[in-house]
Structures are given as structure tokens and as C-alpha cells.
Image: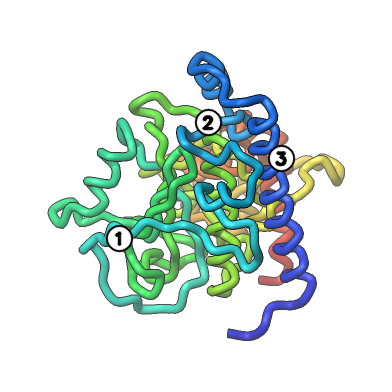
Amino acid sequence: MPAMPMSAVAMRLIVMAGIAMRRVARHSKQAKGGRGTAEDETQQAKGKGHGALLQRPGAMRSRRRADWKRARFRLAWPRTMRIAEHPSPNHDARKSAVDMLILHYTGMRDAAEALARLVLPAAKVSAHYLIDEDGALTRLVPEERRAWHAGVSLWRGRGDINSASIGIELVNPGHEWGYRRFPTAQMEALAELGHGILARHKIPTRHVLAHSDVAIGRKEDPGELFDWAWLAGQGIGLWPDFARGQRRAGDLADLRRDLARFGYACPPEDAQEADMTEAIHAFQLHFRPEQCNGVADAETLHRAAILAASCGGV
């Protein structure tokens, strides 16, 4: 593949260094304070969102170099992630080059249940990677193979998203079993893994997508609690400055045009608002998480217009 521009390489180096520094600071702080009590760790784990501090049992607490080998990560670049292997039989040959990254939540009670299903031949589902809430990473399918994660899907008029994508499952109960925010450790592991994937494949920022983006009306993962803005801040995916620009008058036809231009599968041009509800809801899950009701309000129109403009002539 062509060499990456130095600016992109530098950006990823800076982002990954920042993640490493935050982890070192977190572990150093714990080392200074001693092991603490079980109650202390329980209180830490109660924090919600990927900004909360969630400490894995047995994680690094010492600042001594001899103890660093216990850590889940290496403090070096290029970074070598610790990846467990649990091969799934559910894959086949790709029919196109990889140019998409699709994020999912597992939507099952716990990680063990999700892993069991992802490797079950009869289930006929899989993904390339599974990331637990504590950041533990498992590889299920080699990246060169076509994992079965997207199902019936469409983006920019293209079907067979499985052939063109890498699929990552994030352990989360989902809307059926107690949907919750994605913890810090999980998000940081995703950022590390994502940088590696982007280095190996030519994936445009607008092709880092939710399952709900490509499976409109059928799927809603990873959902409105996933922090796409944070991930884009790490250099993975697209999150424009929606505060810029003047709000302009628009209507349903404008919204349909903008969503279709960005990549969403939309109904015909003469569609009524009821026909657009599922496409609007999918867009809002990703880019307007404060309101996911499928209603085309002024802010939804504004954000869709900005995203369409970001596509340029493409």
C-alpha cells in the first residue's frame, strides 16, 4: 500500500503517546496510594462512561520496571497489543479490498455469551475482533478473510459490506439487556486497535461507521452512548465541528439529498417524512445522539448538510 503522509503518521504517534501517558499516570497514581480496599475499587468501577476509571484486578500497580511485564500493554512504539486468539469458523474469502471499519456492540448479557455465539458454526456470525469492557482484545477472524458481521447492509450504493470491511464487536449488553456507556479501557483499546487497522488498510474517515449506519432500520448498534466525537479526536473516524456555519432553512428533500450524498441508503426522492424516519434515526444514532427519534429537526438538517459538504466532490 502507498506510504502514509508524514502528517498522518505524526498524528497517530502523538495520539498513541497520549494514551500511553494517561495509562502510566493512572497506574503511577495507584502505586503511590497503595493497593486500597475492595470497596475503593468498587467505587471506581461505578463511574459511567469511557471517562470513568475502571481498574482490572491484577493490573499494574508498581512503578518498578520489573513489574511492567504484568501490564496489559507495552510502553513502546510501534505498540504491540496483547491479543488473545479464539478462531471462529465463520468466515470466507473476500471479494473486494478493505476500505471500511464497522463498529458493533455485542448486545448479549456478557462477554462469555457473546464470544460463544461468535465462534458457533450454527450461528453463522463473527467479527474480526472482540473488545471486552476491561480492554481485553480477542482476534476471531484474520483481517484478510471476510468475517460475517454486517449482514444485509448498504453504504453508498454498495452491498456486501462484509467483503469490504473490518468488523469490531464491543462487549456491551445493548438496548435489550441494559445498555450502558463504553468504559475508558475499552475505548482506549479500540483506539489502539483502530490505528493499527488504519495503517494496514486504506480506510477513509467517512468509512468508519456504525452497524446502524449500514443496516438502516435493522440494527442500532453501537448506539447513542458510543462516543464518536472522542474516537474522531484520536484520529479515527469523522466528527466535524457542528458548531460552525450558519443554520439555514432546509426541508426534507434537502435532508434526503445530504444523507444520500454522505452514504446512507435513502428512499426515493419523492419520499414522505414517514418513509425517511429510519434513515434519519440511523443518522442521529451516530451524528445527533442527543436526539434519536427520527424527526428532522433544524439541528439534524444542519449536521447532515455539514457532513455532505465534507464529502467534497466525492
Label 2, on which residue?
181
Q: Is residue 26 above or below residue 202?
A: above
Rendering coords of residue 102 (x, y %): 47, 56
The residue sitting at 38% across, 54% down in the picture is 138
* Quadrant where the C terminus is found in the figure: bottom right
Q: Is residue 237 left or right of residue 271?
A: right
Closer to the chain start, of discs 1 and 2, is 1
Measure the alpha-carbon separation of dots 1 and 2: 25 Å
Mark 2 falls on what kind of element?
A: loop
Q: Is residue 179 left or right of residue 198?
A: left
In the rendered picture of this protein, how many numbered marks are placed on residues?
3
Q: Is residue 276 above or below residue 79?
A: above
Visible residue check, residue 285? yes
Label 1, on which residue?
148
Q: Is residue 156 left or right of residue 252?
A: left
Mark 1 falls on what kind of element?
A: loop
- The amino acid type, in three-letter code, at marker 1 is Trp
- The amino acid type, in three-letter code, at marker 2 is Arg
Q: Nearer the viewer, mark 1 or mark 2?
A: 2
Closer to the chain start, of discs 3 and 1, is 3
Q: Are marks 1 and 2 in contact (CB under 8 Å)?
A: no
Visible residue check, residue 239? no
- Of residues 217 and 185, the one drawn nearer to the viewer in this rendering: 185
The residue sitting at 86% across, 42% down in the picture is 246
Measure the alpha-carbon separation of dots 2 and 3: 23 Å
Answer few, some or many: residues within 10 Å of disc 2's Cα (few below 14, many 20 plus, some between 14 and 19).
many
- The amino acid type, in three-letter code, at marker 3 is Ala
Give the quadrant of residue 177: top left
Label 3, on which residue?
25
